[in-house]
Image (spheres, rainbow, N blue to C red):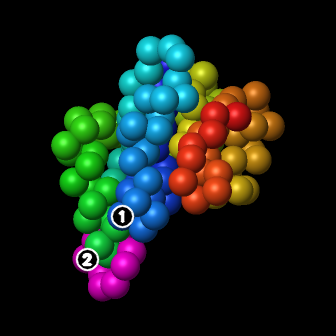
């Protein structure tokens, strides 16, 4: 099972001190592979060039992708949300996102999402 990490999800470790990798490990009872997509990586790099809290969080997110050896899939789509939706149409994936609109669309496809509850726990649903 592939678990796809969205941009906003990769900002959580720095912004809210949530260990997303340990939390995912806790809630998953099957084998999985953590992946992200090139548009997410590009968004993080863009944010990291800025200033402030989001720039710091994006730098941490990029470091975690490398440290945890998260595979970055090459996708032709430029927009991250559209790319994730196309992936969900083609294969059974779980999407980690805080974006309510994206989450709703993923759930309507019959796919699962992982999201943040109470600013500290991840929920699979």
Q: Foreground residue, 69 or 108?
A: 69
Position of residue 11 relative to residue 104, above or below, is: below
Q: Secondary structure at mark 2?
A: loop
Q: Residue at x 53, y 17 (%)?
A: 29
Q: Residue at x 27, y 46 (%)?
A: 65
Q: Secondary structure at mark 1?
A: helix
Q: Residue at x 30, y 37 (%)?
A: 70
Which mark, residue 14? 1
Position of residue 16 relative to residue 67, above or below, is: below
Q: Residue furthest top?
A: 30
Residue corresponding to mark 2: 49
Position of residue 108 relative to residue 120, above or below, is: above
How much space separates mark 1 and mark 2, taking CA atoms?
16 Å
User: Magenta includes 46?
Assistant: yes
CB under 8 Å between discs 1 and 2: no
SS majority, magenta: helix
Please give the range of residues in magenta. Answer: 45-54
Q: Quadrant of residue 10?
A: bottom left
Q: Is residue 6 left or right of residue 117?
A: left
Position of residue 71 relative to residue 39, above or below, is: above
Residue 44, image x and y in percent?
35, 62
Q: Is residue 3 left or right of residue 74?
A: right
Which mark, residue 96? none
Q: Residues within 10 Å of mark 1 (few under 14, many from 20)?
A: some
């Amino acid at each position: 099972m592939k678990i796809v990490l969205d941009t906003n999800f990769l900002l959580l470790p720095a912004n809210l001190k949530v260990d997303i990798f340990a939390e995912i490990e806790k809630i998953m009872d099957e084998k999985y592979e953590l992946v992200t997509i090139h548009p997410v990586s590009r968004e993080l790099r863009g944010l990291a060039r800025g200033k402030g809290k989001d720039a710091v969080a994006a730098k941490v997110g990029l470091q975690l992708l490398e440290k945890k050896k998260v595979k970055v899939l090459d996708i032709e789509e430029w927009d991250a949300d559209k790319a994730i939706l196309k992936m969900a149409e083609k294969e059974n994936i779980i999407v980690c996102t805080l974006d309510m609109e994206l989450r709703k669309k993923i759930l309507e496809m019959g796919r699962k999402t992982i999201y943040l509850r109470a600013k500290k726990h991840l929920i699979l649903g």
